[in-house]
Image (cartoon, rainbow, N blue to C red):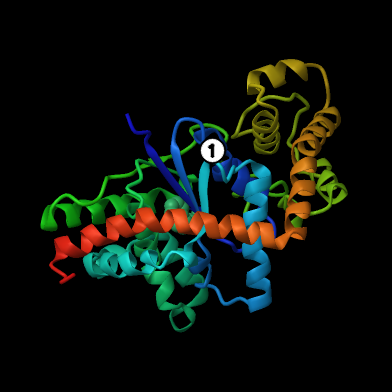
C-alpha cells in the first residue's frame, strides 16, 4: 500500500518562529515523517501579501528553512521546498481562483480580520486570493492530511470545497484532504496576556517566545510570565489561564502528561514551576537554536536542500497540474 500523503506549509514572516508556531503546528510535522509521505512547503509567496524589504525577506526564508531542519524536518524523508520554486502553485492557484466565488472568498475570517485592520485601500488583492493559492499548495500533492493549527481550519475547508467542485464539474482529479489539528496542547497563549493567543503581532514582545532569541532573554520571559491567584499548580483554563498555559508548554516540551506534572509540583510554588518550565525550554530549544545557527552559516548546503526538494515537488505537482489542465479542456 502506498503511504498517505501529508502536506503542510508555513509562511516565512519572521526570522524566528515563536513557541506558538512550533507547538501549535510544526510540532506535528516531525512524527508524521514516520509512516507518511511528507511534503513541507515554505509559503514564501504567501508572505508577499505583506510588504517586506528584500534583504529581510531573504533572511526570513532561509531562517525558516534552517529552523525547520533544526526542529527535525529530515530532507531524506520529507520533501522540503520553497513555494516560489515550484511554478505549478501559481498555475493551479489561478484555476482555483476561477472556481471560487467572490462571496465565499469574502467570508474567510482571516481575510476579514486582516483587511479590517489595514483598511480597503491598503489591503492587497493577494490577501483576498490567499486561500486559493493555499488550496493549490495542498491539492497539487494530492494530500490526504494537512497538519495545521486551529486557525487554518477554514482554509482547509475551502480547499475541500474547491476540490469537490472541480471534481464534480470536470471529473475526479483531486484527492480530498483532511485537516489534522492537535486536540490538546495546540493552542499556546501569550505569556503576559494568557487569554490571547501567542502571536507575533502581540502588543508587548514580553509575552512571545521567539525561539531564535538568546536563551537568557527567553528564560527571563518565562520567569516573568503572568500567573494567577492561588498557589497550586493545576490546570484550570478559566481560573488559572497563566498556569494552565505554562502547564501546556511544559507538557509539550517534555512529553509528560499535564496530570503527571501537577502531581510532581504538588506542594511546590509558582517559582519552582516556572524554573522547571524554563529548564524544559532550554533543554529543548537550546540545541535547536545552535543547529539553526550552524545551518545558516553554510548557505550553499541549505540552498541545495531546498533545490532538491523543489525538484522532487515539481514532479508531483506537474502530474496533478497536467491532469487538471486536460480535464478542463485546455489544449495540450
Ligand atoms: N496559511 C498557512 C498559515 O498561515 C500557511 C500555509 C500556506 C499552509 N500554504 C499552506 C498551511 C498549505 C497548510 C497547507 O499558517
Above or below for 115 versus 275: below
In this rendering, position of residue 332 left or right of residue 188: left
- Along the line of sight, which residue is nearer the eye, 84 or 195? 84
Query: Circle 1 sits on which residue?
Result: 28
Q: Residue at x 46, y 77 (%)?
A: 123
Q: Residue at x 32, y 50 (%)?
A: 157
Q: Is residue 210 visible?
A: yes
Q: Residue at x 74, y 44 (%)?
A: 288
In this rendering, position of residue 80 left or right of residue 6: right
Residue farthest along the right direction in this orientation:
216
Image spot of residue 291 (x, y percent) = 76, 47
- Along the line of sight, which residue is nearer the eye, 163 or 256? 163
Q: Quadrant of residue 130?
A: bottom left
Above or below for 223 versus 109: above
- Along the line of sight, which residue is nearer the eye, 242 or 314? 314
Q: In the rendered image, which quarter contains the N terminus?
A: top left
Image spot of residue 180 (x, y percent) = 42, 39
Give the secondary structure at mark 1.
Answer: helix
Amino acid at each position: 500500500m502506498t503511504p498517505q500523503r501529508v502536506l503542510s506549509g508555513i509562511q516565512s514572516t519572521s526570522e524566528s518562529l515563536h513557541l506558538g508556531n512550533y507547538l501549535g503546528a510544526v510540532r506535528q510535522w516531525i512524527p508524521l515523517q514516520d509512516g507518511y509521505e511528507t511534503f513541507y512547503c515554505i509559503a514564501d509567496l504567501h508572505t508577499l501579501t505583506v510588504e517586506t524589504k528584500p534583504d529581510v525577506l531573504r533572511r526570513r526564508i532561509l531562517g525558516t528553512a534552517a529552523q525547520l531542519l533544526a526542529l527535525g524536518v529530515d530532507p531524506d524523508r520529507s520533501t522540503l521546498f520553497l513555494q516560489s520554486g515550484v511554478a505549478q502553485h501559481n498555475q493551479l492557484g489561478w484555476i482555483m481562483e476561477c472556481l471560487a466565488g467572490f462571496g465565499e472568498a469574502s467570508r474567510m475570517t482571516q481575510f476579514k480580520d486582516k483587511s479590517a485592520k489595514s483598511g480597503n485601500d491598503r489591503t492587497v488583492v493577494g490577501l483576498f486570493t490567499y486561500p486559493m493559492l493555499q488550496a493549490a499548495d495542498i491539492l497539487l500533492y494530492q494530500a490526504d492530511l494537512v497538519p495545521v493549527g486551529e486557525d487554518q481550519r477554514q482554509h482547509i475547508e475551502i480547499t475541500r470545497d474547491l476540490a469537490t467542485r472541480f471534481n464534480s464539474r470536470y471529473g475526479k482529479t483531486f484527492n480530498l484532504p483532511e485537516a489534522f489539528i492537535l486536540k490538546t496542547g495546540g493552542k499556546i497563549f501569550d505569556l503576559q496576556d494568557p487569554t490571547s493567543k501567542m502571536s507575533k503581532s502581540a502588543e508587548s514582545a514580553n509575552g512571545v517566545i521567539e525561539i531564535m532569541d538568546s536563551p537568557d532573554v527567553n528564560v527571563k520571559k518565562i520567569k516573568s510570565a503572568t500567573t494567577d491567584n492561588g498557589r497550586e499548580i493545576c490546570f484550570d483554563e478559566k481560573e488559572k489561564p497563566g498556569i494552565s498555559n505554562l502547564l501546556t508548554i511544559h507538557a509539550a516540551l517534555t512529553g509528560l502528561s499535564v496530570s503527571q506534572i501537577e502531581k510532581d509540583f504538588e506542594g511546590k510554588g509558582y517559582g519552582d514551576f516556572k524554573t522547571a518550565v524554563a529548564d524544559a525550554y532550554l533543554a529543548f530549544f537550546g540545541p535547536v537554536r545552535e543547529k539553526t545557527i550552524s545551518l545558516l552559516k553554510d548557505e550553499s548546503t541549505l540552498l541545495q536542500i531546498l533545490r532538491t526538494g523543489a525538484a522532487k515537488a515539481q514532479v508531483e505537482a506537474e502530474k496533478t497540474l497536467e491532469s487538471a489542465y486536460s480535464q478542463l479542456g485546455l489544449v495540450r
